[in-house]
């Protein structure tokens, strides 16, 4: 083994029922290197990571870790940690109701002579760890007091303090804003200088080019190649991931902006609000219109949509749907008025993990029909097959459990669930989060297609570019309040300014 | 090899396997003691009614089977168990007998009101209990174990109060029929079968099964998808109460009395065990009603077998516990994974030798 190499994986193979998830994949990580693991959804990134950390058992291949003789097989994440391999996931896997210090030392608390926990030492060492990483925070506060970004960094600090040689960051930036991402990158670079090998899994291409030294690309469970960052410009990377040149993202939206009349009015919200999440707002949405909700994370963009849909009940104001006043007490009421909501938290509010793809697709339609009108199995199968084909959902069969699908394909299933109800008005909250570039474009195209068919849409995304491509109008939110709308000259600059609070229609 | 795998991979394999295991013990016992080998399966007609160990198991297991239906739904929808069913059984029995005998009457041979009114009264009260549990769990988000603990301790005592602290005897033929014989078939078997069939048909013909599983797996996502999660959980508890009511009336009729302290005693545990033996996760979500029913009769078969083997009723729970440990271990995921690994290793060794 090369002296510089900290981790080698050779010929890793693993099959899920009906799908070859990994097919002889090689991966090499060197000391002090940030190595991006790239690929579309279902390419095998997560599976490879899980094989490394012992969550999945691989069938063939070998893993070698620097300093350990012979092949390594981990049976659990704990096992992997002991061998110097730590993972930090997109969702922070710490205990929010414990203090930062407790989280840092959970399971390995410093002990006094009496065998009790030495709280003083724990706090002192925690402070030192945080200081080393340039984070000045009160380590005795509960973890939940801090932002998601800080929590993530604390998770990383914990991993690093446990003497890790290999640090895996699985989509750590998905829920962070730009400023937080920058902080994270700084931390990553510090660790890199200390000689830690970092595996970075992300969907954001810019971020790869901002911090990474090397890229390994996977496609359909196979290794495409390993490249130094300089040898693989962005376009080539995307081509390598997709296995083809993708069509120009910018060109999907037609240029002329449509005009709307009152007759086309679909949703007319006046003074709607939900205590603690969104202050009273007005919003009008017409047939064929795509309204973007933009603002920083936590600005109330999801919450606004949730009030319209009845996921959070409105406490003030009135809502008119197609001209008539509507009372929405629960999502089912909204659905009966022709609405649908694709929630941003796919895992918590989207998928029903232990149900099949078919059952997940027909669920909303069945709920709309009512309990006594069970969809005949034949129709269920037809519907499922139709959407699997139409959205190109990659699944072993329609009876596969949805939790076995990759994130992007799960998202497509949820999308199919709503399309099956044939809604007039669809709310898409972060439909492209954690999804590969190819699928992103597909979803954006779908949004425009639905609008063309006369449906009204709300589109929420953290990526302004994506919204510019799809939206006809944007509502800007700040601190739980709708602060303005931008209908003309939708450019990155105007939107950014509005979000920051500099201008727009205030 | 692949055929064997196909069979062992089936959802109902383990529950059925356990049942067969218990039967095999019976056959071995009969062979060893010099009886007819298939004694266990022999069904004859004595005194004009069906007779045999199998019939006895089906008969005695009726209450557990009825309870298991409701328990399956409750476990699936709320990822919790209803531990009040045994007590509610007792309450339903007491109320039913009190209605039929009249308040304060300790023994009667005439009914104070029509049989159907008394029976429905008892069952209805059990439904109210189920609704109470359901309200706490579904709308107040109380943990199922805590919510049902209230009636677990209270229902039996309320029943005793209703009966004025007496054991009320209803020695009347039409009432006795419920726990007795319908023609030549034990009535409880018929009642259990009707309950199972009705629920099975409802699950087959409506979307209830999908709704319950969906809510049990992900309550929040189900709500977003248009389901009234709370109402579905509530409904499951009401059905569970309904089952407890029916089982309670059957149990009371068997002994022609409302013995508050003994009716349904520890039945909640058997009902929960049935669900587990049926291969259902107590963590909620996917459920398998047939598995639970088989589980219920397996438990009864174990009890009956132990008595047939001459184990005294004082020691029987110990043997029962041992058998349950074995069955539960066989079904445990780590054990399954271990067996799978072992067979994979074997296959590998074989492959290696061939190469």
Image: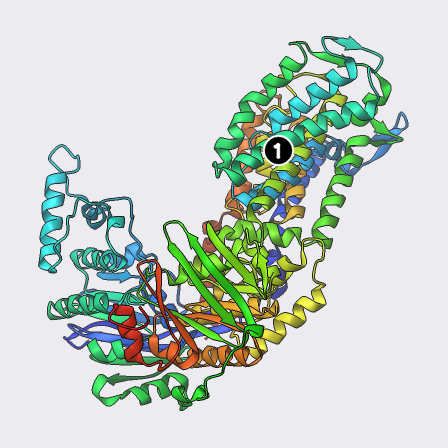
Q: Relative to residue B99, is residue A307 depicted above or below?
A: below
Q: In which quarter of the image is the C terminus of chain A?
A: bottom left
Q: Relative to residue A119, is residue A456 depicted above or below?
A: below
**A242 or B319: nearer the viewer:** A242
Q: Position of residue B76 (x, y in %)?
A: 57, 46
Label 1 secondary element: helix
Q: Position of residue B290 (x, y in %)?
A: 67, 47
Quarter occupied by residue B113? top right
Quarter occupied by residue A461? bottom left
Give the residue displayed 28% in from the left and 61% down from the top: A88
Q: Relative to residue A352, is residue B281 depicted above or below?
A: above
User: In the picture provided, is A46 more to the left or to the right than A353?
Assistant: left
**A293 or B187: nearer the viewer:** A293
**B83 or B318: nearer the viewer:** B83
Q: Name the residue under label 1.
A: B130
Quarter occupied by residue A263? bottom right
How many numbered dots are placed on residues in this image? 1
Q: Where is residue A358 in the image (x, y as percent from the top left)?
A: 60, 66
């Amino acid at each position: 083994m090369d002296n510089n190499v900290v981790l080698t994986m050779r010929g890793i193979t693993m099959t899920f029922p009906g799908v070859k998830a990994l097919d002889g994949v090689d991966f090499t990580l060197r000391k002090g290197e940030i190595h991006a693991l790239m690929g579309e959804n279902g390419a095998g990134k997560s599976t490879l990571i899980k094989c490394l950390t012992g969550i999945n058992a691989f069938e063939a291949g070998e893993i070698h870790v620097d300093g350990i003789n012979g092949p390594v097989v981990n049976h659990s994440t704990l096992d992997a940690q002991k061998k110097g391999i730590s993972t930090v996931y997109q969702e922070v896997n710490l205990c929010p109701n414990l203090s930062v210090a407790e989280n840092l030392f959970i399971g390995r608390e410093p002990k006094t002579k009496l065998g009790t926990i030495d709280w003083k030492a724990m706090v002192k060492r925690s402070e030192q760890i945080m200081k080393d990483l340039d984070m000045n925070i009160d380590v005795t506060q509960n973890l939940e007091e801090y932002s998601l970004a800080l929590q993530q960094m604390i998770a990383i600090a914990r991993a690093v303090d446990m003497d890790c040689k290999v640090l895996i960051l699985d989509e750590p930036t998905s829920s962070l804003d730009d400023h937080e991402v920058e902080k994270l990158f700084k931390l990553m670079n510090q660790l890199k200088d200390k000689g830690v090998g970092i595996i970075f899994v992300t969907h954001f291409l810019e971020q790869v080019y901002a911090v990474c030294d090397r890229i390994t690309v996977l496609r359909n469970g196979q290794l495409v190649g390993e490249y130094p960052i300089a040898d693989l410009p962005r376009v080539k990377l995307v081509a390598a991931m997709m296995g083809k040149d993708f069509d120009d993202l910018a060109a999907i939206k037609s240029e002329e902006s449509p005009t709307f009349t009152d007759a086309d009015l679909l949703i007319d919200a006046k003074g709607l609000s939900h205590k603690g999440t969104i202050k009273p707002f007005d919003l009008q949405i017409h047939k064929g219109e795509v309204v973007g909700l933009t603002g920083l994370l936590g600005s109330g963009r999801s919450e606004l949509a949730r009030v319209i849909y009845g996921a959070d009940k409105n406490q003030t104001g009135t809502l008119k749907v197609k001209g008539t006043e509507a009372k929405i007490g629960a999502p089912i009421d909204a659905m009966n008025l022709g609405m649908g909501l694709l929630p941003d938290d796919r895992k918590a509010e989207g998928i029903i993990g232990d149900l099949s793809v078919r059952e997940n697709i027909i669920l909303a339609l069945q709920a709309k029909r009512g309990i006594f009108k069970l969809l005949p199995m034949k129709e269920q199968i037809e519907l499922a097959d139709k959407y699997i084909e139409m959205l190109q959902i990659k699944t072993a069969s329609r009876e596969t459990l949805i939790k076995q699908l990759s994130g992007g394909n799960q998202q497509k299933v949820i999308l199919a669930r709503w399309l099956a109800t044939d809604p007039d008005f669809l709310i898409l909250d972060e439909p492209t989060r954690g999804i590969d570039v190819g699928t992103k474009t597909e979803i954006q195209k779908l949004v425009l297609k639905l609008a063309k068919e006369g449906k009204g849409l709300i589109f929420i995304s953290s990526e302004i570019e994506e919204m510019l491509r799809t939206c006809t109008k944007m509502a800007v939110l700040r601190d739980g309040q709708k602060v303005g709308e931008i209908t003309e000259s939708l450019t990155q600059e105007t939107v950014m300014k509005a979000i920051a609070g500099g201008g727009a229609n205030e | 090899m692949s055929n064997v795998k196909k069979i062992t991979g089936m959802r109902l394999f383990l529950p059925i396997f356990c049942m067969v295991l218990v039967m095999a013990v019976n056959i071995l016992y009969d062979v060893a003691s010099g009886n007819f080998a298939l004694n266990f399966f022999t069904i004859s007609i004595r005194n004009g009614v069906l007779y045999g160990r199998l019939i006895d198991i089906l008969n005695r297991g009726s209450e557990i089977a009825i309870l298991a239906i409701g328990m399956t739904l409750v476990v699936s929808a709320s990822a919790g168990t209803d531990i009040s069913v045994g007590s509610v059984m007792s309450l339903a029995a007491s109320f039913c007998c009190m209605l039929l005998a009249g308040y304060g009457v300790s023994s009667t041979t005439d009914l104070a009101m029509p049989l159907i009114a008394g029976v429905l009264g008892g069952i209805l009260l059990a439904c109210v209990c189920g609704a109470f549990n359901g309200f706490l769990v579904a709308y107040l988000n109380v943990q199922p174990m805590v919510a049902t603990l209230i009636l677990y301790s209270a229902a039996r005592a309320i029943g005793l109060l209703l009966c004025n602290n007496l054991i009320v005897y209803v020695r009347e033929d039409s009432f006795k029929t419920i726990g007795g014989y319908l023609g030549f078939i034990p009535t409880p078997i018929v009642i259990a079968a009707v309950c199972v069939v009705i629920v099975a048909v409802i699950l087959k013909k409506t979307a209830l099964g999908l709704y319950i599983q969906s809510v049990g797996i992900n309550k929040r996502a189900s709500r977003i998808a248009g389901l009234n999660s709370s109402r579905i959980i509530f409904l499951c508890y009401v059905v569970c109460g309904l089952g407890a009511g029916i089982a309670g009336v059957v149990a009371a009729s068997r002994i022609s009395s409302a013995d508050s302290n003994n009716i349904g005693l520890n039945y909640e545990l058997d009902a929960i065990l049935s669900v587990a033996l049926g291969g259902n996760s107590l963590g909620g979500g996917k459920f398998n009603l047939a598995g639970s029913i088989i589980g219920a009769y397996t438990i009864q078969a174990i009890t009956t077998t132990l008595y047939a083997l001459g184990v005294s009723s004082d020691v029987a729970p110990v043997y029962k516990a041992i058998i349950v440990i074995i069955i539960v271990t066989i079904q445990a995921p780590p054990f399954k994974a271990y067996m799978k690994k072992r067979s994979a290793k074997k296959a590998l060794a074989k492959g290696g030798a061939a190469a």
